[in-house]
Image (cartoon, grey):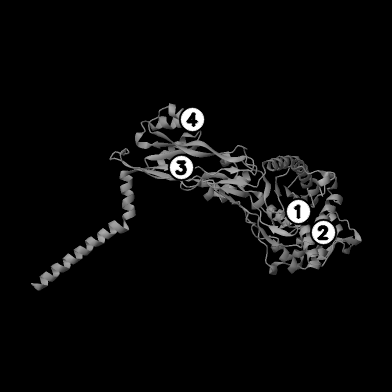
Amino acid sequence: MHKRIYVVFIVFVLGFMAVIARLFYWQILSFDRLKGIADDQTVHASSIYAKRGRIFSSDGAAIVMNRKGYMVFVEKDKIKNQTDLIKSLSGVLTIPESTLSGKLSNSLSNWTPLVNKISEDKIKKLESSTIPGLGFLEESNRYYPEGSMAANIIGFVGKNSKGLDQGYFGLEGFYDEQLRGRDGMIKQEKDAIGNPILLEKMSELPSEDGRDLYLTIDKTVQYIAEAKLKESIEEYQAKGGTVTIMEPQTGAILGMVSYPSYDPTDYGNYPAEFYINSVVGSSYEPGSTFKVLVMAAAINEGVLTPDTTYNEDGPVNIGGYTIRTWNNQYNGPYTSMTDVLVHSSNVGMVFAQSKLGGEKLLSYIKNLGFGENTDIDLQDESSPAIRSGREWRQIDFATASFGQGIAVTPLQMVRAVASIANGGKLVKPYLVKKIKLSNGREIEMKPTVIRTVFKKETATKIAQIMVHAVDDGEAHRLKPAGFNIAGKTGTAQIPIAGHYDPTKTIASFVGFAPVDNPKFIMLVTINEPSTSQWGSETAAPTFFNIAKELFSYYGISPSSGG
C-alpha cells in the first residue's frame, strides 16, 4: 500500500516538474520568439526611414544630396493578372520582363519588393494605371549636383545582403555608419483582418537622420585637377593617371583625382576596377621623385651636404648589375649632390645611398610612412608591403635610391615629400574637416602631426635643391615665369612578369609652391603614356598647367612666389 502511494507521489512530482519545465521553456526561453509571433498577429509596424547624411565641399557647396525616390512592391495575393502586371511594370521601369518574373517567382513572401530608387515621374505613371496589388514606399535617393565630380573620393550607395542601403568605397564606405543614421518605427495594434485599431495608442521610435560631412576638398581645385588630367590623358594617349593636391602643413586634401572614373548614379554599368581610387588603392614604383627623399635622409644624417662632390665617370657595377644614368651621360669629377638631383643621376644616387647605408635607408623609408596605410578617411586604402631588412641585397638598396624596386601609393608619396615642404613633419592626410550631427552639433577634425622625420634645415636645403631641379632641369621651359617652385620629375619602368618592360612607364612629377610658404603640394602620375615615356614631357606639363590655374585661383602673384 505504502509502495503504491510512493509511486503515485513520484508520478505527480515528475508531472509537476514537466509542467514547470514547459512553462519555463515558453515563458523564458521562447519569450522573444513567441512575442514576435504575437506582435506579427496583433501589431502593425511601419518603418520611419532616416535620411542619409549629405556631403559638402569646403565652401559649403553640395556634392552629394538626397532627393525623393520610391521602392516599388507588390502584394501577391492581390494580383489579378500577373502577366499584365509584369508587362506594365517593364514598360514604365525599363526592366526586362524576365527579371520581374524571376523576382515574383523566387519570393516566398506575399509582400515582395521589386525595385528601388524609382523617380517620382515614373511612380505617377504607375499610379495612373491602378494595377491591383501594386504599392510604393517613399525612400531617400542619392543625388549628385556636380555629376560625377570626385566620384572616386565619394564612393556610392548600393544594397547589402539584406537589401538595405550601404555605402561602398571612398567616403560613403568609410563613414557609412555615420551617414546612414538610424531608422525609426511606428507600432499600432491591429484587428484580426490586419486593419489598425484607431482607438489604440501608437508607440513611436523616432528616426535619426544621418550626419553631414564637410570636406577639405575645394570644389574649384577639384574641377581644375579633373579637367587638366583628362586633357593630359587624351593628349598623351595614356591608360590613366592621378592628381593629388594637399596642404603640406596640415595634410588636408584640396583635390584628388583618379582616372578612369565612373558615374555614381550608374555605377553598375562600369567595370569594378574603376571604383578603386588609385591615389590610395593602387601602387607604383616612384622612380626619380624618390631621390629627393633619399638625398634628404643622407643630408639629415650629416653624411653628405648639397655641395659634396664625387667623381661621376661612368656606370657603376653592383653585385653583377650595371647601373647607368638615364641618358648615359656623366658629369665628371666635381659632380655635387645638387647636380645629382638636377640631372637626376642614378649613379649619383647610388653614391649617396652608399654613404647613408642600407640600415639607415630602411629606417627612413619606414619613418616616412611607406609600408603602412596613411589612415586617410577612405574605405579603399591599401599599402604595398616593405620587405624586411634580411631580404634586401646590396643591389636592392642601390635601385631603391632612385625609386625602382620599391612600391608606394601616390598618397604615400605626396605625404612623404610634404615633409620637405613643411619643415620636416610627417602629417596624417584627411578629407573630412567637420561632421554635423542631426541636432546641429558639430565635430571638428584637427590636423595631426605623426612625427618629425627631417630637421628643418635639412628640409630647407632639399627644397632649394628642388628649386634648382625645376629651374635647371629637363622641364625648366614649362615653369611659369617668376614663380619659385620646388619639384622633381620621375619616370619608372613597370615590372611585368618578373622583369621591367622598357616601353611601359609611369611618369610623375611632384612639387610644391610657393617654396617659402607652400600653399599646396601636388603629385601627378601618368600611367603608360604613349606619346612619350618621360615624366618631363607628360607629368610635368600637367603639373604646371594645374599650378598656373591654382596660382590664379589663390591670388598668388610672381612676386609672392617665394
Quarter-of-image position of residue 335: bottom right
Residue matched to label 4? 92
**Distance of label 3 from label 2 (alpha carbons):** 58 Å
Nearest to the eye among marks 2 and 4: give it: 2
Disc marking residue 461: 2
Q: Earlier in the sequence, mark 3 or mark 2?
A: 3
**Distance of label 3 from label 1 (alpha carbons):** 51 Å
Q: Earlier in the sequence, mark 2 or mark 4?
A: 4
The reply to whether callout 2 and callout 4 are in contact (CB within 8 Å) is: no
Amino acid type, residue under disc 2 in the picture: Lys
x and y, in percent, of residue 275 in the image: 61, 46
* Residue at the outermost bottom position: 2
* Residue at the outermost right position: 333
**Distance of label 1 from label 4 (alpha carbons):** 53 Å
**Distance of label 4 from label 3 (alpha carbons):** 26 Å
State the SS at label 4: helix
Amino acid type, residue under disc 1 in the picture: Ala
State the SS at label 2: helix
x and y, in percent, of residue 227 in the image: 71, 39
Image position of 146 with respect to 34: above or below: above
Quarter-of-image position of residue 541: top right
Nearest to the eye among marks 2 and 1: give it: 2
Front one among 64 and 435? 435
Disc marking residue 492: 1
Residue matched to label 3? 49
State the SS at label 3: loop
x and y, in percent, of residue 144 in the image: 59, 38
